[in-house]
Image (cartoon, grey):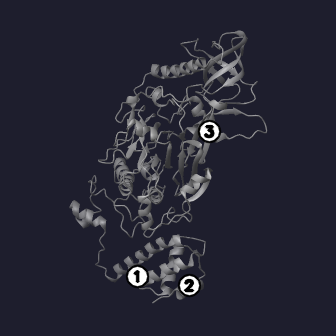
Amino acid sequence: MATNEEIKKEFSRSGFALAEEDEILQRCVTLCINYSLKPSELVSSWELYHLNRQSIDQTVKNEEMDGFLLHLQSQQKESIMKEESGLHIYSNRDVDMLFDGIPEDTEDEIVTTPTSKSQRLLPDPFDSVSKSRDYGYSTGKSVGHVTPFGQRGQKFVVRFNIGDAAAQAENGDNNDVENSEDDMIIKKVQTRRRCSLKVNGVGPEPGCRFMYYRTEDRFDSLEKRIVRHADAFAASGLYEEQVDPAVASQRSIFSVGMICCDGEGVLNDKSILLQSSAERTSGQRVPLDLNRLNQFSIFPGQIVGIEGQNPSGHYFTASKLLDTVPLTLTADVDLPPAKKQNLDQEVLTLAEESRETSEVSFIIASGPFTTLDNLLFEPLSELLAHAKRKPPQLILLLGPFVDSNHPEIEKGAVDASFSEIFQVEVIRRVQEYVEFMGSEVRVVLVPSLRDANHDFVFPQPPFDIHIPDLEHQITSLSNPGTFEANKVKVGCCTVDVLKQLSVEEMSRNPSGVPTDRLGRLASHLLRQRSFYPLYPPPESLPYDSRLAPQALQISSIPDILLLPSDMKYFVKVLSIGEGEDAAKCVCVNPGRLAKGEGAGTFVELTYKGDPESMHASVISI
């Protein structure tokens, strides 16, 4: 029987150091027993595995042992087949073939549309590192291959923290990765009370008609937006009567209009135009001069209030620019009660609603949920496993799920429809998580324009998800969408509006004054009261002018705003307004859960009534 000392001596003789010595030696002893190997044979197999991976590091790490186990299984399989040439080792593929009635010798000759059973491509245990799924859509990696995601060294490391220490202590240590099954059962019992959930249904419905708008629909949506903001400036009573900016005037005037670009390029000092309302004024575009301002931030589509002069009628020179629309912060003016869907099974009484506290815990993650080298959805599985160890009240999963930019999806190299991949790899994983955790947890899914299995239009309808007995726990929002969880208002949009604004924005700041560009870009949405204030949108965005006006409007400042982006992750507290009337909002970019072939980030957030008592952590998976 092999001993720890003998195995350690053989590794040292071959020039390898052991990182977690006790754990590695214990696993190596087990492998020697299970595969009838001598210490020298085990280390020789390790050297072959090490060479195949083309690794430079001569350190044996515990996270590499799973891949080494698959390598040993592959060697064992090959040795058995060499000894008995007529022997066939059956796998789940053979079982599917038998159920489908396909002879073994014609497997490679039949070219047909797969049946529902033949689409179940469960990888052989020797061919994949995935052990938890009944369905797999892999890229045909070589035998014994371990994905780069599976080889990552550090798991669930906190990259960034914000908030009070009390909430952080309550959340516990995020670096604790491994928990026993007993701990998981204890945590399951200790899950917090289920949060309430009300979805504000102002977005398009599943199966709606889209891209049927007319040219006048596009004009009307812009006109109504300018008029609504002009009325808000007038209702505040803080500004003079609005005047047509294109009319010549020697005195200082106040006007409201939309920033436009004179050309197809980005804004510059010579290309800024102001378009006023066609209903209230002439609706003409007038060149805008901002040289007198030492600080501003503008972009095409932004509605602004301008104080200034236009002596000649040809050039409006601004002396003051107002980019914050003074709307009421609390009234949901565009959301009638019938549009709010209560997803609680039980109907809360008024007394129960009054006792409901504005406190809720989230896990927030944005797709892609699988790495570029396969469709195994390992990051999603890891995230849900982490949620079992540290259960939140609400998990927010933001698309894309079946990413149209994934190489295998682009090439069409999968033997199943996009909807089947979504149901098998995403919905079933989520369903298993909810069934395991019980009735205390909720999961909300938000689609993305990159979802190959969903409507390509913005605004985007929610997924049509109907799971018996779990409809109150697993739901989908429109994109963009808003909801309330324990009276905490949350808004989210999966279009990368931050990245698009960063390209189109033109800003000027006093020299020597530090600026927070990401925070400024995010605050544009709140100041404009729109999930997508940019106009015109890029050609790649399927913008529907008929659906947009109501779906994109932010009628009241949310407590939490989720804006997933390819830009760097962040959690920021944004302040809109001045003095006591200022409203605060927690803005979150969780980053991408999968980045290339490696791991990305997600966010854990606990909100307790206001941003001052909030705690959030950005965690690399």
**Secondary structure category for the residue under label 1:** helix
Give the residue at mark 1. 34
**Mark 3: few/some/many CA within 10 Å (<14, 14-19, 20+):** many
Left or right of 9 on screen, residue 211: left
Work out which residue is located at the far front of the displayed protein and give it.
Answer: 351
In this view, the residue in front, 304 or 557, is 557
Q: CA distance from mark 1 to mark 2?
A: 18 Å
Give the residue at mark 3. 574
Q: Which residue type does callout 3 highlight?
A: Leu
Q: Earlier in the sequence, mark 1 or mark 2?
A: 2
Q: Which residue type does callout 1 highlight?
A: Asn
Tell me where residue 245 appears, x and y as whole percent: 65, 14
Q: Earlier in the sequence, mark 2 or mark 3?
A: 2
Which residue is found at the position 45% from the left and 38% from the top?
Answer: 354
In this view, the residue in front, 362 or 379, is 362
Q: In the rendered view, would you say 468 is above or below 318?
A: below
Give the residue at mark 2. 8
Q: CA distance from mark 3 to mark 1?
A: 58 Å
**Circles 2, 3 touching at the beta carbon (< 8 Å):** no
Of tags 2 and 3, which is closer to the observer? 3
Among the 4 quarters of the image, the one containing residue 381: bottom left
